[in-house]
Image (spheres, helix red, strand yellow):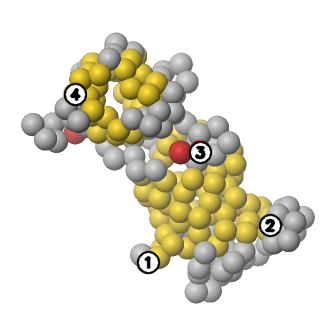
Amino acid sequence: GVGTVPVGRVETGRMNIGDKLIVMPGGLQTELRSVETHHTPLKSAQAGDNIGFNLRGIAKNEIRRGDVIGHPDNPPTVAAEFTARIIVVYHPTAIAAGYTPVIHAHTTQGAATITELVSKIDGTTGQPSDDKPKSLKSGDGAIVKIMPLRPMCIESFSEFPELGRFALRDMGATVAAGVVQKVDKIWSADKK
């Protein structure tokens, strides 16, 4: 029936029935049992496909919105902190280190703290400036460090654009939009 299997989009690569898979950030290891699209069974799925799927030994309620499934030899990255390039779309006052909006990336969302304002981006050259800004206001571009408050799958934009874009929202409004430049710290299992 409808809603009996988890659904998702294959963002990159491909997966075949029988492939060993890992669900992140939880780390559950499994195997792809079946794939369907519009109730038609498939033998494999590739980037761009919107699919329903079934994983061996994993109940539907064990897969949560925001989970990313990948191959165990190259598992999805669970970021503890990352460096990003952002543009401040709108903020009524100014953003400083310690600001904790909600990050929205692919299907996941959660609180995240801007831990450091690394540099402003010069509006004319597009290059980072040398000075560490004290704060950012509407219209500013900047390089910042961001720490999700709980495990979040996110990738560098250069490697996986689909999983490397995000928005920062606060009080129902978009404060900033950005791309992940690099993941600086991986969320380790002992941190759970």
Numbered disc 2: secondary structure: strand
Q: Earlier in the sequence, mark 4 or mark 2?
A: 4
Which mark identifies residue 171?
1
Which mark identifies residue 28?
none
Confirm whether residue 118 shows in the render: yes
List x then y, in percent, for residue 31: 33, 18
Which residue is at 53% across, 54% downward? 148
Which mark identifies residue 40?
4
User: How far apart are the alpha carbons under marks 3 and 1?
Assistant: 27 Å
Q: Earlier in the sequence, mark 4 or mark 3?
A: 4
State which quadrant residue 92 falls in: bottom right
Q: Which residue is mark 2?
A: 121
Which is closer to the viewer, label 4 or label 3? 4
Q: Is the C terminus in the top left, top right, bottom left or bottom right quadrant?
A: top left
Numbered disc 3: secondary structure: helix
Q: Earlier in the sequence, mark 1 or mark 4?
A: 4
Q: Earlier in the sequence, mark 3 or mark 1?
A: 3
Q: Which residue is mark 3?
A: 161
Which is closer to the viewer, label 4 or label 2? 4
Q: Is the N terminus in the top left, top right, bottom left or bottom right quadrant?
A: top left
Dot 2 alpha-carbon crowd within 10 angstroms: few under 14, some 14 to 19, many 20 or more: many
Which residue is at 59% across, 64% downward? 177
Give, as a three-letter code, the residue at label 1. Met
